[in-house]
């Protein structure tokens, strides 16, 4: 079956930019070429790593405590996570098309001169602002890269895995690390082996904090026995113990899948195997680039048995060995293949395609490139009947690319727009991530908001660069621009109306 460039750009990529459909080769060749070399990540070069962010977080907490001891100033003594939440809320309530500065002017119009009388920022306030700017810069870099990358298939894969290993910034202690997890754990491994990707994610501060493993303590660990002795002396109950959250989601969501054959005993045993997997604390003497620490005192001693296989005591290596075997499990191959096929091909992907992909994964020992190639080389993936309704995130990125629209350094309006469309940045409702089927995104209210967003994007397109009809041809291809749609584009009362018609059209809303 022929593989069109438009399908490669719009079904497998992030939506075409003008000129993208002029690339040499057919659709398969274009996609395969993107898998050979990692894309440029220049947009992320100046962003700090998680280890540095952890240190700044602890500095901010110390500054808060010092500030509270000197003066009871509620605004200056806000904890880091509450401050970060405020910044995201501010961004998400910004009206589409209004930049952050305009929104702030609107809220402070009643007191235009108070900034002149405001006292200089305390150290705690300065750090809070720094971390807020850092978080916005992380989000802006993500969307700037998506809007401009020449390897959109790889970027779609990156965002797929980011949603597969979902972390939400509404969990306070993980808020600053969701974006850096995508950058540090997923991007380096998206074209590698799933085993390496899995280990990088499960040992990242974002995941360890989001699913509470950073505070998990084995019931028979040295730390638990010490806490037991202290609690008995004080007449209190121990406050912390074994936490199963991360282990459960590793099995149910990240590897085997809900029907993957694991039992509750496997959850408990995996949770015990990864006790001690944590993040450096304020008092830890860690290297500057360390964002993971293994706390031997918190680790549950002894051998573990997971899915019928025994794992000898080995400290941090015990958990790593379990993850390595989970990555090679046939149920993992089927689960990942199904999710990828559903993401790229259809809400109900052909079982034969899923099986083909699973076998490619198993035969290559979990090589993700082999998994992607099996998808691309299948005729079923290129069927005209195969198409996906765009999520809000897909829609926004494809509009940025089609309209050649810039992304600012903080992207406050963009963040607010995604929230209004129902897919706030790094804020899924659960560890399962954002849903990936048309029924989840095609409700009347969502469609109405997309029309409004289409008008917003249309107003920002350079009307002198091309006509709406010409731009539609350049990003959707001639097969999609015909009939009444083509007539409407040619007869639009203004360029802005024509571009709005393009962005709101079914041809643009579906990844065909």
Image (cartoon, helix red, strand yellow):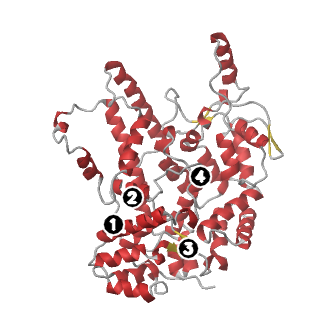
Helix or strand or loop: what does disc 4 sit on? loop
Marks 4 and 1, how far apart in space?
32 Å
Where is the C terminus found, in terms of image quarters?
bottom right
Q: What element carries label 1?
A: helix
Q: How far apart are the two marked residues, 2 and 1, measured between alpha carbons?
A: 10 Å
Position of residue 58 relative to residue 104, above or below, is above
What residue is disc 2 on?
417
Residue beneath disc 3: 31
Residue at 53% across, 39% down:
291
Separation of disc 4 and disc 2 at Cα? Answer: 23 Å
* Mark 4 vs 2, N-terminal side: 4
Q: Mark 4 — residue? A: 165
Contact between labelled residues 4 and 3, with CB atoms less than 8 Å apart: no
Q: Position of residue 42 (x, y in %)?
A: 41, 58
Residue toward you, 55 or 211? 211
Residue appearing at x 56%, y 41% in the figure: 210
Find residue 472 and report its image quarter: bottom left
**Mark 2 touching mark 1, by CB under 8 A?**
yes
Q: Which residue is drawn at 34% across and 79% down?
A: 498
- In which quadrant is the N terminus drawn? bottom right
Rendered image: mark on residue 456: 1
Residue 286 disc label: none
Q: Which of 441 and 479 is in front in this view?
A: 441
Q: Which of marks 1 and 3 is nearer the N terminus?
A: 3
Q: At which x and y percent is residue 415?
A: 39, 55
- Which one is in front in this view, the residue at disc 4 or the one at disc 2? 2
């Amino acid at each position: 079956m022929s593989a069109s460039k438009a399908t490669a750009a719009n079904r497998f990529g992030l939506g075409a930019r003008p000129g993208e459909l002029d690339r040499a080769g057919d659709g398969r060749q274009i996609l395969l070429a993107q898998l050979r070399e990692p894309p440029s990540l220049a947009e992320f070069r100046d962003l700090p790593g998680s280890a540095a962010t952890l240190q700044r977080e602890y500095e901010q907490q110390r500054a808060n405590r010092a500030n509270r001891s000197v003066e009871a100033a509620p605004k200056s003594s806000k904890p880091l996570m509450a401050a970060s939440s405020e910044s995201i809320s501010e961004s998400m309530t910004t009206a589409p098309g209004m930049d952050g500065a305009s929104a702030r002017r609107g809220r402070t119009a009643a007191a235009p001169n108070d900034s002149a009388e405001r006292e200089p920022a305390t150290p705690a306030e300065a750090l809070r602002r720094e971390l807020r700017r850092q978080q916005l810069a992380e989000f802006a870099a993500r969307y700037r890269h998506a809007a401009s990358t020449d390897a959109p298939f790889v970027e779609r894969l990156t965002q797929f895995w980011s949603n597969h290993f979902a972390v939400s910034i509404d969990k306070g202690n993980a808020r600053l690390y969701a974006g850096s997890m995508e950058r540090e754990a997923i991007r380096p491994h998206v074209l590698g082996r799933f085993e390496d990707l899995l280990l990088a994610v499960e040992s990242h501060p974002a995941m360890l904090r989001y699913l509470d493993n950073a505070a998990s303590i084995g019931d028979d660990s040295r730390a638990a026995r010490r806490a037991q002795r202290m609690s008995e002396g004080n007449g209190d109950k121990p406050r912390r113990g074994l936490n199963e959250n991360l282990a459960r989601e590793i099995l149910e969501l990240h590897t085997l899948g809900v029907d993957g054959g694991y039992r509750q005993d496997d959850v408990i045993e995996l949770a015990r195997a990864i006790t001690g997997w944590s993040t450096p604390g304020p008092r830890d003497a860690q290297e500057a680039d360390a964002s993971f620490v293994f706390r031997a005192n918190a680790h549950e001693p002894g051998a573990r048995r997971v899915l019928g296989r025994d794992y000898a005591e080995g400290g941090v290596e015990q958990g790593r060995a379990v993850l390595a075997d989970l990555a090679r499990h046939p149920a993992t191959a089927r689960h990942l293949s199904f999710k990828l096929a559903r993401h790229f091909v259809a809400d109900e992907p052909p079982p034969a395609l899923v099986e083909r992909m699973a076998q490619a994964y198993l035969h290559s020992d979990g090589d993700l490139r082999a998994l992607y190639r099996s998808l691309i080389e299948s005729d079923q993936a290129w069927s005209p009947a195969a198409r996906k309704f765009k999520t809000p995130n897909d829609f926004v990125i494809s509009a940025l690319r089609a309209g050649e629209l810039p992304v600012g350094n903080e992207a406050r309006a963009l963040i607010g727009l995604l929230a209004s469309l129902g897919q706030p940045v790094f804020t899924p409702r659960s560890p399962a991530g954002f849903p990936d089927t048309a029924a989840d995104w095609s409700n009347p209210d969502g469609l109405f908001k997309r029309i409004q967003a289409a008008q917003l994007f249309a107003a920002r397109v350079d009307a002198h660069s091309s006509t709406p009809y010409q731009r539609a041809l350049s990003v959707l291809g001639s097969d999609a621009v015909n009939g009444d749609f083509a007539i409407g584009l040619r007869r639009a009362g203004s360029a802005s109306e024509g571009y709005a018609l393009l962005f709101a059209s079914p041809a643009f809303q579906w990844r065909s």
